[in-house]
Structures are given as C-alpha cells and as structure tokens.
Amino acid sequence: MEIALKLVSGVDVWLNTPLRPLEASGTSGMKAAHNGVMNFSVLDGWWIEGHIEGFTGWAIGPAPTEIAPDNNMNETDADDLYYKLENMIIPTYYNDRKSWIRMMQNAIGKNAYYFNSHRMMRRYVTEAYIR
C-alpha cells in the first residue's frame, strides 16, 4: 500500500494498458482520479464508463467491440498511444496549464465523485446479493 500511495500521488497521467477485454475493473485508475490524475487507458473495465475524451483523460485505441482478446489491436493501440502522447497530452501539459488543471478538476469532479467504494458496495448489494 505504501508503494501504491507513492505511485498514485506522484503521477500526472495514469497509463493503463490491459489486454481487452480482460481488465477486471481498474481500481488503480479510480484511485488515481481521487488525486486529480487523468487516466490514459484502453476502453475496458471502469474506464468505459469514466472516460470523457479530453475532459477526464484519454482513451487508447477504439471503443471495445471484441468479446475475446484480440492481439491484432496491439499495433493500433500503440499507434494511438504515441499519437495522443505527442499531439495531445504532452503539449497540453507543457503549453496549456489552465486546461491541464481543469482536466485534473474534471477527474476529481466526474470520476472520483462517481467511482468510489460507496457506489461499489451499493451495486454489489443490489445487483449481486439481493436478486
């Protein structure tokens, strides 16, 4: 937990590249949002719901359509990752501090507000246990 605390509180962008559709949930990205960290992840797990492109973070690759791992997506995802780093993320970080801070606020206000342990427990109880 000590290492996680240092990682989550010491980064500006949370990079998450699980193999779609195998992301269990993505709680580390949720945790990062509580610290104003934007996520940069494939659209899998919680990020499908929490992602608002250029507002709460960025998606890597296209929207999910597969139900089994697709290794052919690796090149597409890598191209998108490098394109967005070079043309969106890095320029915003260094050249548009106001927009960067606003996105940090959005990560907290939209994602941290909604994706929390209270919601998780409520959904487990109502959707898994009381059916």
Image (cartoon, rainbow, N blue to C red):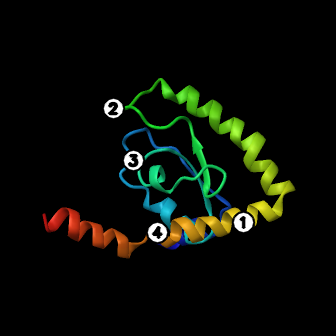
Can you tell which of label 3 and label 4 is closer to the viewer?
4
Tell me if 35 is positioned left or right of 84 in this view. Answer: left
Q: Quadrant of residue 75?
A: top right
Q: Are marks 2 and 1 in contact (CB under 8 Å)?
A: no
Question: Residue 102 — which label?
Answer: 1
Give, as a three-letter code, the residue at label 2: Ala
Give, as a three-letter code, the residue at label 3: Glu
Q: Nearer the viewer, residue 40 or 2?
A: 40
Give, as a three-letter code, the residue at label 1: Arg
Indicate the secondary structure of the residue bearing disc 1.
helix
Q: CA distance from mark 2 to mark 1?
A: 36 Å
Can you tell which of label 3 and label 1 is closer to the viewer?
1
Q: Are marks 2 and 3 in contact (CB under 8 Å)?
A: no
Q: CA distance from mark 2 to mark 4?
A: 28 Å
Indicate the secondary structure of the residue bearing disc 4.
helix
Q: Nearer the viewer, residue 111 or 86?
A: 111
Q: Which residue is mark 3?
A: 23
Asked whether the viewer can see residue 6, the reply is no
Q: CA distance from mark 1 to mark 4?
A: 18 Å
Query: What residue do we see at 73% from left, 49% from top?
Result: 89
Query: What residue do we see at 38% from left, 40% from top?
Result: 21
Q: Which residue is mark 2?
A: 68
